[in-house]
Image (cartoon, rainbow, N blue to C red):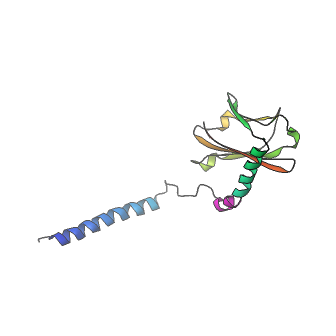
Amino acid sequence: MKINWGTGIVLAFIGFISFILFFVVRMGMDDSTNHDLVREDYYKAEIGFQKELDAEINANENNVNLNMVRTPAGIKLEFPKDLDQATIKGTVSLYRPSNKQLDFDFPISLSNNHLIIPENRLVDGRWDLKVSWEYNGEAYMYKEKITH
């Protein structure tokens, strides 16, 4: 049987399409790859994005910025000294983009106007730190991307 140019081109296209479809089906069925969204509540979190922007702007305009310092004990978040630490309420969220099982949140509990995130809670890699708090009815937020 003799194959002409037209038949060869059609066979090459069929081979290429089969090759691509094989990998698409294989990746779609593979359980070791994770195709989840970055966050389970992605759309709900998107709605609150404007509130976060307002809280960040509020912190910058009122000079209520946090200072982050790395210490052997962990990451130290220093709140401004002129704030009454008893009236600060909020949460600290650490988000790990590569593994949602490592994410954790905890309430703000200050001593001497600072808070320490323990070193043993932070696995090496990238973390997104978000501190959101309220002081005298005003919302404030501090965000930082850290590599540990």
Q: Is residue 10 visible?
A: yes
**Residue 46 shown in magenta:** yes
Q: Residue furthest front?
A: 61
Left or right: 113 as drawn, with respect to 12 = right
- Quarter of the figure with residue 50: bottom right
In the displayed orientation, state which residue is furthest to the top: 72
Give residue 148's quadrant in the image. top right
Residue under the point 87% across and 47% down: 136
Frontmost residue, 31 versus 125: 125
Tell me where the magenta segment starts and ends, as one range.
Answer: 34-47
In screen coordinates, is 124 left or right of 30?
right
Residue at the (81%, 39%) spot, across then down: 109
Quadrant into which the N terminus falls: bottom left
Q: Nearer the viewer, residue 128 or 144?
A: 144
Residue at figure coordinates x 72%, y 46% from the top left: 105
Identify the image quadrant of residue 115: top right
* Percent position of residue 30, x then y: 46, 58
When the figure is inspected, residue 13 is found, relative to residue 118, above or below; the finding is below
Left or right placement of residue 115 versus residue 24 in this view? right
79 falls in the magenta region: no
Residue 141 is situated, as x and y percent measured from the top left of the image, at 74, 47
Looking at the image, can residue 75 be seen?
A: no
Q: How many marks?
A: 0
- Residue 63 at x, y percent in the picture: 78, 41
On screen, residue 36 above or below 132: below
- 125 with respect to 132 (left or right): left
Q: Position of residue 24 (x, y in %)?
A: 41, 62
